Every structure is written in C-alpha cells, then in structure tokens.
Image (tube, rainbow, N blue to C red):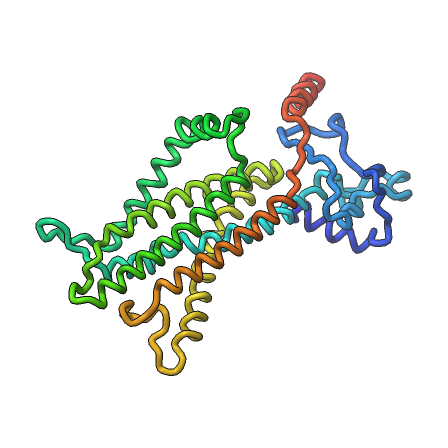
Amino acid sequence: MCCLCSACILLAFVWDVSVPSNGEGIYEVERKQGKNNGVRRILHTNGFKYLDRASIITLVDMVKPANPWHLCTITQVEVKSILKLLPIWFCTVLSSVVFIQMLSLFAEQGAAMNTTTISNFHIPPASMFAFDIISTSTFILLYDKLIVPLYIKVTKREPKPPSELQRIGIGIAMAMASMIIAAIVEQQRLKHAGSKNTRGLSIFWQIPQYVLVGVSEAFVYVAQMEFFATQTPDGLKSLGIRLSMSSSAMVSYICSIILTTVMAITSTNGEAGWVPPDLNDGHLDRYFFLLAALTAINLVLFVICAKRYSPTSFENRAENMEMGTQEQANEA
C-alpha cells in the first residue's frame, strides 16, 4: 500500500483532529531511529492540510509507541506532492494534441500536395516526419552549448537558464505557432487545388510546421520528464516518469474525441465536414486553427497552474548523506 493511500485510510480515524497552523505536533521519524537508505525526508507544506491529520500526534500516540498503522510520518503524508502535479500533467496532455497531428493529418495534408520534385522524384508524405526528428535532435544537442549562452547574452541576465515550467510553456507556445502555420499552408494548398495547376503547392511548404513541432517537443518532453522526476519523492521517481510519459499515451484518445466531435458538427446537412476523406472538399485549415485556439487556452491554463505551483521541499541531500554515513559508523 502506498504512503498516500495509508494516510487517506488514517483520515477516517483522525478526521476530527485539528491541524495546527504552525506545523507543530506533526510526527516524523528521527534519523537515529532508522536507516537512511539514501531517501530524503520531505519538509512540511501547507497544501492539502486535511491530509496532515494522519500525522498529528494525539494523546494515545504519546502514551504508546508509534504505530505505523495509526500514525504516518510527515514524509509519508507529503507524498501528497503527487496531487500538486496533476494540473501540470493535465496541461501537458492537452499540449500533446498538436504532436499527434504529425502522424495523421500532417501526412494526409502532404499526400494532397505536390510530392514530385526535380527529376520526377516522388517524396512519400510520411517521410517529412524526418524534419521533426532532425529538428528535435539538433535542438537538444545545441541547447546547452549554444542556445542557453545566447539566451544569457541577449537578455543580459545572470547565468540562469529557463526553469522546467518555463520551458514547457515555451514549447506549448511554439506548438500553437506550428498549428497556425499548418493552417496557413492548408489555405494556400486549397487555393492551388482550385486552380488549373491541381496539387501545385510543393510538399516542402510543410517543413516549417514540422520543424516547429520538433522544437516544441524538445522543449516540452525533456522539461516535462525533468520536472516530474525532480518533484516526486525519492521512492516514487518511477511514478513521476510514468506521469510524464502517460500524457503522450492519452493524447490519442483526446484527438479521436476532438476529431469525431468536429466531424459530427461540421458534416450536417449533407456537407463534407472539415476533415473529409478528400481534403479538397473540406476545410482542414479551420481544424488546425481550432487546435491552435485550444492550445492557446491550454497555454493560459498552464501559466495559471505554473504560477500557483509550489515546489516540493526536500531536506538537504548533503546533510542526508552525512546522516547515513554517521549511522553506518555507529553500527560498525
């Protein structure tokens, strides 16, 4: 049973216990009472105070030895820090809606464009995904060596790169820009499809949107994994990494719901809808603009959640290691 679940069970027995505002009377195991095991204790926070009741020392606990089934340590209760991550996680799930478009609608858009280049060489629409991979890999490699020093030089600030939350916000903004560019490209494609030169717009016009999505992925996914790994307790690092990866797993269902809803609304009265099998009969540009608007709303929600977020406070790692070394010396 996880620490948070056991704390919630204890709430049924101590619900009427009042929580002190100054954090006094809260139970925590001293270092000398147990092994260190390299796990840092979590400092007390004021969020989700109703969960603190599970760690309040009552009169019964003062008379009898601490029972782990009757009293939680503050470190166990502070696993509630996982709950603080959920709003950030929800915003990253919505931002991944843009990334999934490369595997579906971007390829369909490319198939409706002119894929023939010089010497009649045919470019498979799905191969344009290579620009996303190249831009993502290049950005990750150059971030610390070129981009961060250039950012410091331009802003003339102290050598402090953007935080994880700031990088996620930048990535969401770039994802919104990529959807706007994709919509503009689709408008131009429809104009060429309506002229005599059918499918005259070259597929290379898709390169900017692929590059922007790739850089956006580098911002969001890397910062997202770092953020969840650093903000989860030492014993739950795998859970934090799974949270960061689950956003890309859930986005397929969200995209399916959005597309189904849009087609149900726009295909009434015998109309083809925004995303029909033949894109020349639809308005894929409007769908991309809709995704850009949803991403903008998601960006606003993310900024609000990021400003309200309070980082999890751990004890000093150096002090933690010193305590562990001292315990091993005493045992020897």
* Furthest residue toward bottom: 269
Closer-to-camera residue (318/198): 198
Q: Is residue 30 left or right of residue 318?
A: right
Which residue is at 81% across, 38% downward?
A: 23
Where in the figure is residue 17, as x and y percent of width and height? 86, 49
Q: Give the residue at x 8% y 50%.
A: 119
Quadrant in which residue 137 is drawn: top left
Residue in front for this viewpoint, 124 or 118: 118
Q: Is residue 61 left or right of residue 255?
A: right
Q: Position of residue 20 (x, y in %)?
A: 85, 42
Image quadrant holding the C terminus, namely: top right
Q: Please give the count of numbered marks on the rendered protein.
A: 0
Residue at image point 85% right, 38% down = 25
- From the viewer's perspective, is 127 left or right of 1? left
Residue closest to the far left: 119
Q: Is residue 315 above or below residue 193?
A: above
Query: In terms of depth relative to the viewer, which is nearer, 295 or 8?
Result: 295
Expressed as whole percent of the image width and height from the top left, the position of residue 124 reads 21, 54
- Residue 272 coordinates in the image, percent (x, y): 33, 75
Q: Is residue 19 left or right of residue 251?
A: right
| Relative depth, front residue between 252 and 237 | 252
| Residue 186 figure quarter | bottom left
The vertical placement of 281 against 34, above or below, is below
